[in-house]
Image (tube, helix red, strand yellow):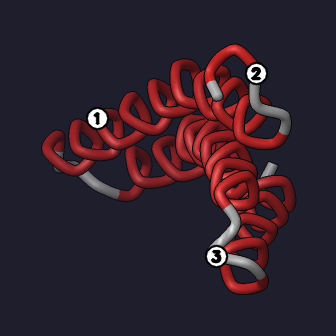
Amino acid sequence: MIFVLIALWGISITLLLLNFRNKSVRWLSSVSFCGGAGAFAAVLGDRIIPFVANISESYETTAVLNTVMACASIVSYYGLPYTFLMFALAYNPLSIWE
């Protein structure tokens, strides 16, 4: 999942660097970022939070990481369909709106 995270966020940054002025490219970059947020939540939940819980006695650290994981998961669940829809509309706009 770490590879997926690096690949999706790398693609997102690359798309923005190559053609920031194109609206459909910005939305496609957002799709990739939101997908990467889901991978980030999975990496936090599977690897980082259990590791931190084993080495740390602090409840606050794991609570903060759980909050970050929940926020990343929400960005993935709700942001991914929205950004994909907006990408589709930007790439091929409906003629009734023009």
Q: Name the residue type under label 1.
A: Thr
Seen at 22% across and 50% down, the residue is 61
Q: Residue furthest bottom?
A: 17
All told, the count of numbered labels is 3
Helix, strand or loop at label 3? It is loop
Could you tell me which secondary element the residue under label 1 belongs to?
A: helix
**Structural distance between the alpha carbons of marks 2 and 1:** 39 Å
Any mark on residue 17, and which? none
Q: Give the residue furthest to the top.
A: 96
Give percent across and percent down for residue 89: 72, 30
| Pointer 2 with pointer 1, Cβ within 8 A | no
The residue lying toward the viewer, choosing from 12 and 37, is 12
Give the residue number, with chain letter if any, for mark 1.
67
Secondary structure beneath label 2: loop
Label 2 crowd bin: few (<14), some (14–19), many (20+), radius 10 Å: few
Camera-near label (2 vs 1) is 2
Q: Which residue is mark 2?
A: 94
Residue 20, quarter of the rendered image: bottom right
Residue drawn at the location 43% of the way across and 48% of the way down? 54
Residue ID for mark 3: 20
Circle 3: residue type: Phe
Instruction: Please identify the quarter of the rendering in which residue 55 is found.
Output: bottom left
